[in-house]
Amino acid sequence: MPHHKSAKKRVRQTVTRTLRNKIKTTQARGAEKKLRSLVAAGDKDGAATVLSTAQSLYARMAKAGIIKQNTAARKASRLAKAVKNA
């Protein structure tokens, strides 16, 4: 348990940030699942629209420091490759 005022504030900030990061991560994971299901179904047009959304989500997560820049680029690239080969 924190005893100092600043340490208590850091705990509150960590909880808020963790929730915010978890929401963004869940959104990105959901977009990826949706895209992969559209690719499996053969809907290339639908997958292309979801691809731009997913790439945007990953880029914003990298910018916010939730995931690393290379991780975001790798995931976006793999999704683009999946759509292209569908």
Image (spheres, grey):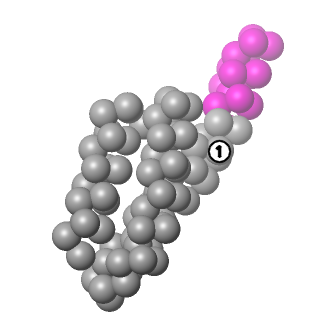
Please tell me which residue is depicted at 56% across the width and 31% down the height of the picture: 64
Q: Position of residue 38 (x, y in %)?
A: 38, 80
Of residues 78 and 83, the one nearer the viewer is 83
What span is colored magenta in the figure? 1-15
**Is residue 22 among the parts visible in the rendering?**
no
Of residues 43 and 65, the one nearer the viewer is 43
- Does residue 76 lie above or below 62 as drawn? below
Q: Position of residue 13 (x, y in %)?
A: 71, 29
Q: Main secondary structure of the magenta part?
A: helix
Look at label 1 and name its amino acid.
Arg
Residue 17 in the figure: left or right of residue 61? right
Residue 40 in the figure: left or right of residue 33? left
Quarter of the image where one finds residue 15: top right
Please tell me which residue is depicted at 42% across the width and 68% down the height of the picture: 48
**Is residue 60 among the parts visible in the rendering?**
yes
Q: Which residue is mark 1?
A: 20
- Does residue 59 lie above or below 78 as drawn? above
Q: Secondary structure at mark 1?
A: helix
Residue 69 in the figure: left or right of residue 40? right
Of residues 32 and 41, the one nearer the viewer is 41
Is residue 30 on the magenta stretch? no
Q: Position of residue 59 (x, y in %)?
A: 48, 40
Q: Position of residue 81 (x, y in %)?
A: 23, 60
